[in-house]
Image (cartoon, rainbow, N blue to C red):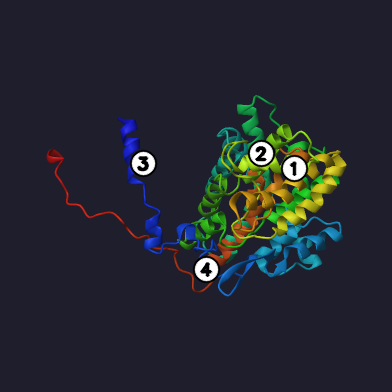
């Protein structure tokens, strides 16, 4: 009977794809040329991956702006001073301005003092209610913080800002503790709980809680870069849009952020770098001469033809919904990935990644004919970097959340405070025939 029920549900969910065209429905809120349907305005982030010339999408070098600042300028700015930039980036996303020296010091000190979790929270909510997935544990912990907040339902700007800062500060701690709780319970490994340190940056603290003092300055600097690059990506990405949709209903901060975590947990959103790592492991095993462009090309063609790797026909980490010629995040991360590969003695592996990035667009063109212009996206290098740093794969997507909470908070604040705000409610057209009710005895 359950199988019959499942078949009925499957049949009930089928919709002819042609009907989307007939009814002029934008599937996935995408236009026919794959550009996003314009559904809102924001001052927080901007993603540019192409130009519109005579009404047509024309490939262009990718640009990413945080509050009008180009991401490469922002990153090279704090890197040139030897500073970590995540706190500065969070301040920028929330306030719309780069902090002055005294403002940044105050902000950093303020956030540092928010890192510790409420008394007994670690034991009662993370270690006792452990689970096999860190993202699920993070979402559950965020929802549990609602009960710790006496002003959880206060929708004033100041209170939502307080809640946002509290979550940004606590996400790395919750994530680290959730990972150790998971591995202790499900992998039968040691349970290690390290308290966050006052004198360490966000990236350093995360590595300290994860590995103790066993990390290099370069590793901490690259993790900080990853946090900055993942902190924001416009209001249209799935998890930020989720934050705005839920926030537009005037729910509490914890429910809105919990929903965003659920979106990011999805395999099509936050988990792509894991698939890249698996794919590259497969390529390393099957391509004998990593320096041979022909061998790499031939194996990528096998992957596209569904004859190799997972049979999906996808080259993971290559291609993006918006970026065409380049993803600026991938470009910035690749610069640092090479330095880390040199430090780790893994330059041969780095050059294999470079070959795949360089050859994949040609393989796509040869296999599918002239079509969409594609490039490596940030996921292509982020998993590679995390792996070299020694970060477990179970934390790849949670680190994304540790970074993106800054962007989510900024989008929630914008959604609930700007004067023309309305509950987000797009339309769906029913295509079901009308039926008359039949009594149970006559069915």
Which element carries disc 1, helix, strand or loop? helix
Among the two numbered marks 4 and 1 on one chain, the one whose residue lies closer to the N terminus: 4
- Contact between labelled residues 2 and 3, with CB atoms less than 8 Å apart: no
* Residue corresponding to mark 2: 279
Cα–Cα span, label 1 and label 3: 44 Å
Q: In the depicted view, which residue is nearer to us: 320 or 292?
A: 292
Give the spatial CA distance, label 3 vs label 2.
31 Å
Disc 3: which residue: 10
Q: Residues within 10 Å of mark 2 (few under 14, many from 20)?
A: many
Structural crowding at the residue carrying mark 3, measured as other residues with C-alpha within 10 Å and reported as few (<14), some (14–19) or many (≥20): few
Residue 413, quarter of the rendered image: bottom right
User: Which tag, 3 or 2, sits closer to the chain's start?
Assistant: 3
Q: Position of residue 443 (x, y in %)?
A: 16, 40
Residue at figure coordinates x 69%, y 60% from the top left: 325
Q: Which residue has dot 1 on it?
A: 294
The Cα–Cα distance between marks 4 and 2, rounded to whole angstroms, is 36 Å
In space, the residues marked 4 and 3 are separated at their CA atoms by: 34 Å
């Amino acid at each position: 009977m359950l199988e019959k029920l499942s078949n009925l549900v499957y049949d009930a969910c089928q919709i002819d794809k042609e009907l989307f065209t007939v009814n002029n429905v934008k599937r996935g809120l995408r236009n026919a040329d794959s550009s996003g349907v314009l559904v809102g305005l924001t001052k927080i982030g901007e993603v540019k991956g192409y130009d519109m010339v005579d009404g047509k999408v024309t490939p262009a070098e990718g640009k990413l702006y945080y509050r009008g600042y180009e991401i490469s300028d922002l990153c090279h700015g704090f890197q040139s001073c030897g500073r970590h930039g995540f706190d500065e980036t969070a301040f920028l996303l929330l306030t719309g301005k780069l902090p002055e020296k005294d403002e940044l010091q105050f902000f950093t000190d303020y956030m540092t003092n928010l890192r510790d979790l409420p008394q007994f929270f670690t034991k009662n909510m993370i270690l006792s209610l452990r689970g096999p997935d860190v993202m699920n544990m993070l979402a559950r912990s965020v929802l549990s913080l609602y009960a710790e907040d006496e002003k959880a339902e206060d929708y004033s700007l100041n209170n939502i800002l307080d809640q946002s800062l509290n979550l940004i500060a606590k996400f790395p701690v919750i994530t680290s503790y959730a990972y150790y709780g998971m591995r202790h319970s499900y992998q039968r490994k040691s349970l290690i709980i390290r308290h966050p340190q006052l004198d360490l940056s966000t990236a350093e603290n995360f590595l300290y809680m994860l590995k103790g003092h066993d990390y290099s300055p370069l590793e901490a600097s690259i993790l900080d870069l990853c946090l900055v690059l993942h902190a924001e990506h416009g209001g249209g990405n799935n998890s930020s849009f989720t934050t705005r949709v839920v926030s537009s209903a005037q729910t509490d901060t914890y429910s809105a952020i919990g929903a965003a975590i659920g979106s990011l947990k999805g395999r099509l959103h936050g988990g792509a770098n894991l698939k890249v790592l698996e794919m590259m492991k497969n390529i390393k095993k099957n391509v004998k001469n990593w320096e041979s462009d022909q061998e790499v090309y031939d194996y990528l063609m096998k992957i596209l033809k569904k004859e190799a790797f997972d049979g999906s026909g996808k080259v993971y980490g290559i291609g993006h919904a918006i970026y065409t010629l380049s993803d600026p995040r991938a470009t910035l991360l690749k610069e640092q990935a090479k330095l880390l590969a040199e430090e780790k003695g893994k330059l041969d592996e780095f050059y294999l990644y470079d070959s795949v990035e360089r050859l994949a667009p040609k393989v796509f063109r040869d296999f599918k004919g002239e079509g969409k212009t594609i490039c490596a996206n940030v996921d292509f290098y982020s998993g590679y970097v995390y792996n070299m740093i020694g970060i477990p794969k179970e934390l790849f997507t949670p680190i994304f959340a540790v970074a993106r909470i800054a962007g989510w908070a900024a989008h929630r604040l914008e959604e609930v405070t700007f004067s023309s705000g309305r509950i987000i409610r797009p339309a769906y057209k029913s295509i079901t025939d009308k039926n008359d009710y039949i009594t149970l005895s006559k069915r």
